[in-house]
């Protein structure tokens, strides 16, 4: 099993989160990260409502390389 980290909570990130949840048997954990954590939380809530799968969320600016690197090391996708 793998850990999946989705960076970006726009249109593509939303679709990927929903698709990954439908195939959650392939992942031990799913994390959705974006600059706006509230947007990630809203997507995660919608995914859980539709699929019953919980997605973890995090706030990170992808242009902040040290912060993104720290999140990648911490989550270890």
Image (cartoon, rainbow, N blue to C red):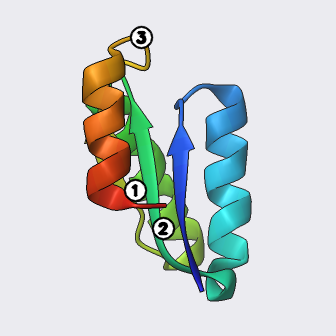
The residue indicated by pointer 2 is: 49
State which tag comes first along the sequence, 1 or 3: 1
Q: Position of residue 41 (x, y in %)?
A: 33, 45
Examine the image and state in which quarter residue 18 appears: bottom right
- Answer whether residue 76 is visible to the viewer in this image: yes
Q: Are marks 2 and 3 in contact (CB under 8 Å)?
A: no
Whole-Å distance between the Cαs marked 2 and 1? 6 Å
Q: Residue at x 26, y 55 (%)?
A: 74
The residue indicated by pointer 1 is: 45
User: How crowded is the residue under tag 3: few (<14 C-alpha within 10 Å), some, or many (20+)?
Assistant: few
Q: Is residue 12 above or below residue 43?
A: above
Whole-Å distance between the Cαs marked 1 and 3? 26 Å
Nearest the viewer among 74 and 38 is 74
The residue indicated by pointer 3 is: 63
Q: Secondary structure at mark 3?
A: loop
Q: Secondary structure at mark 2?
A: helix
Q: Residue at x 49, y 79 (%)?
A: 52
Q: Is residue 13 above or below residue 73?
A: above
Q: Residue at x 72, y 45 (%)?
A: 15
User: How crowded is the residue under tag 1: few (<14 C-alpha within 10 Å), some, or many (20+)?
Assistant: some
Q: Are marks 1 and 3 in contact (CB under 8 Å)?
A: no
Examine the image and state in which quarter residue 59 appears: top left
């Amino acid at each position: 099993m793998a850990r999946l980290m989705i960076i970006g909570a726009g249109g593509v990130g939303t679709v990927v989160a929903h698709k990954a949840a439908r195939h959650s048997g392939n992942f031990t954990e799913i994390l959705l990260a974006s600059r706006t954590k509230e947007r990630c939380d809203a997507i995660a809530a919608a995914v859980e409502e539709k699929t019953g799968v919980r997605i973890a969320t995090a706030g990170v600016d992808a242009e902040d390389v040290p912060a993104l690197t720290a999140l990648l090391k911490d989550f270890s996708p």
